[in-house]
Image (cartoon, rainbow, N blue to C red):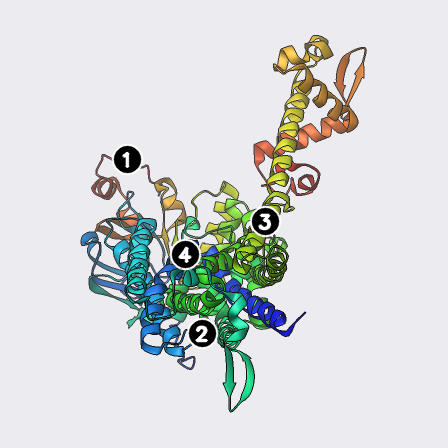
Amino acid sequence: MSSAQIEIQLIASLVAIACAIPGTFLVLRKMALISDAISHSILPGIVIGFFITHDLSSPLLIILAALSGVVTVILVEFIQKTGLVKEDTAIGLVFPALFSIGVILIAQNANDVHLDVDAVLLGELAFAPFDRLIINDFDLGPKSLWIIGVILSLTITLLIAFFKELKVSTFDAGLASALGFSPAVVHYGLMTVSSITTVGAFDAVGAVLVVALMIAPAATAYLLTNDLKKMLGLSVFFGVCCAIIGYWVAHALDASIAGSMTTVLGVLFLLVYLFAPNRGLFSVLYRQRQQRIEVSLLTFLLHLNNHSEESERHVNHLNEHINWQKVKSKSVLNLALNNNMIVIDNDIVSLTAKGKKFTNEAIDYIITNKNSEIENMKDRFFLFRG
Amino acid sequence: MNTIKMEKPAPKTNSTSSQDRAIAVRIDDLTVAYNYKPVLWDIDLAIPEGVLMAIVGPNGAGKSTLIKSILDIIKPIAGSVQIYNKPYKKQRSLVAYVPQKGSVDWDFPTTALDVVMMGTYGSLGWIKRPGQKQKKAALEALEKVGMLSFKDRQISQLSGGQQQRIFLARALVQNASIYFMDEPFQGVDATTEKAIINILKELRKAGKTVIVVHHDLQTVPEYFDWVTFLNVKKIATGPVKDIFNDDNLTKTYGINYKVSIQG
């Protein structure tokens, strides 16, 4: 690995971490769309900053661009507060307006400056190692590494200091307000950090793909854990993994680094969405199928419990009486047999002691709806899990 | 910021007359509007210390809005609110709040214990983090509402009644003098309702003031000793035995209302 390759991966990883942290809270606050808006509407800020400084990594440019991100949020909220349109409409109105101002500004002045829409939208990580921070002839490394490093330190410091405030205002803004933690302060703090991070990251991955780095790792982590700290940790982990894997995919395919990173993020989300242990699609489908079978089983056992007459309990009369297909009644019959809940004698089905006990417990649960009695059954049967 | 010590007024001996009690919450000329449409109109209300009070009224009467504007969550367009003769901002430590269960996202990645711990954040102030002392208080509150064995359960895996108990525990941990609750009985079963009302009655016995937005008119005489009828304007407020009658109910709900009142 050349030193340029190491530097690129290092920058990509820091960008991923810096994005994953605010991204986690944006996802939990159901504000994923606002990151999309911010990432587009920082464009006029970047362009104006670039005209003033002629340097894409100047702090003034970053501040101006972050400011236009915060302005986006304020405008969205202002339009939303009029009550005439909903939030998603307000977002859809604000960011194309600001973005288009940026596009026109670039187009009008593109002849004499080195800034084009492609670079802003997609970034160019491969060039990052060439723009170096040199002080007194001493090479301190790529400029963008320093920029994102400073932004990341700021983000981590704020996260540690205000973790409690972020958590309570995200979960319950009303309580946060009543306790004296102004949700508005926390909200705009988070928006400012998101804007600054977007500006710092756009250089590397571009203004569009930075959204993927904010939202995809957090959305993936959300499917896997029930703990906010773990969710933050997983988001960071997924972000870094995808950044590095994405780099090598781009290397192998000779494709865009940002494009490859985002593709890897998408693939990872898809895999987790399908295979996550509890919330994954397959796990949910399996659980629903189990529940369906168990409901059938219970219906069947209740029927046996309620009817002592033999004609009602004949195997052949089963589908007729409970109105089931042959296949289904057979699978339910087998399930009950395998669990030693019934015995079949001369094609007459009867409940065993265990089957009786289970049926009574289940009836009790359904009637009383008391959780205490059902706690131990929850482990054995999907039916009684929430 | 944390050095301001509140003098918690000593609870007076139980007396039903409002004259010789301290006023826990005083509301003067309160008007609240959403988009310039008043939802609360010129409310005057004095809630004496140590009562267990129901706020009743039809949907859209402004019951939740009243609580939220007392707690400074909604800014009124006119009027003032005083908690023991001082603005709410100076008396935060005296007040605990149980929002409507539906106001939060129960899929939030956190545990029952952690939600209860949030009740201690107010006493900590900004930046400081909860420690062992706060955890102990939270565990005690969980035990009080009978939810200790669920402390590590993810909150989405709790039933509606259990979630409501968690919210109650979060208010208890604040160890406040005044408790505001927004429909704590919504969507809970009879057992949980009994458990909650018993805790509320205990709070009143300890001299606390409890204010509850309530929907079930049948249970008002059984659960509460004080009641406020609200429908955009204040209709009546006072002891249940004096003012909980068909006349006030009709005035509040606008239809001929008949409720049999015991005792």
Give whichever of B208, A190 is nearer the camera.
A190
Task: Using the rendered image, report if marks 4 and 2 lie on a common chain.
Answer: no
* Rendering coords of residue A12 (x, y %): 56, 66
Q: Work out which residue is located at the far front of the displayed protein and give it.
A: A111
Q: Chain of mark 4?
A: A
Q: Under tag 4, what secondary structure?
A: helix
Q: CA distance from mark 2 to mark 3?
A: 42 Å
Tell me the mark number nearer the camera, choosing from 1 and 3.
Answer: 3
Give the class, few, some or many, for how many residues have Cα within 10 Å of label 4's Cα (few <14, many ≥20).
many
The amino acid on which the numbered mark 3 sits, given as a three-letter code, is Val
Q: Work out which residue is located at the far right of the displayed protein and give it.
A: A345
Residue A159 higher or lower than A329, as above or below: below
Task: Using the rendered image, report if marks 2 and 3 lie on a common chain.
Answer: no
Q: For residue B254, which quarter of the picture?
A: top left
Mark yes or no: residue A118 visible.
yes
Residue tagged by mark 1?
A: B258
Q: Mark on residue A36?
A: 4
Q: Residue visible at 62% across and 62% down?
A: A244
**Mark 1 touching mark 2, by CB under 8 A?**
no
Residue tagged by mark 3?
A: A267
Q: CA distance from mark 1 to mark 2?
A: 49 Å
Q: CA distance from mark 1 to mark 3?
A: 63 Å
Give whichever of B261, B125 is nearer the camera.
B125
Residue B89 higher or lower than B61, as above or below: below
Q: Residue visible at 74% across and 25% down?
A: A336
Q: Work out which residue is located at the far bottom of the displayed protein and give it.
A: A136
Q: Chain of mark 1?
A: B
Q: CA distance from mark 4 to mark 1?
A: 56 Å
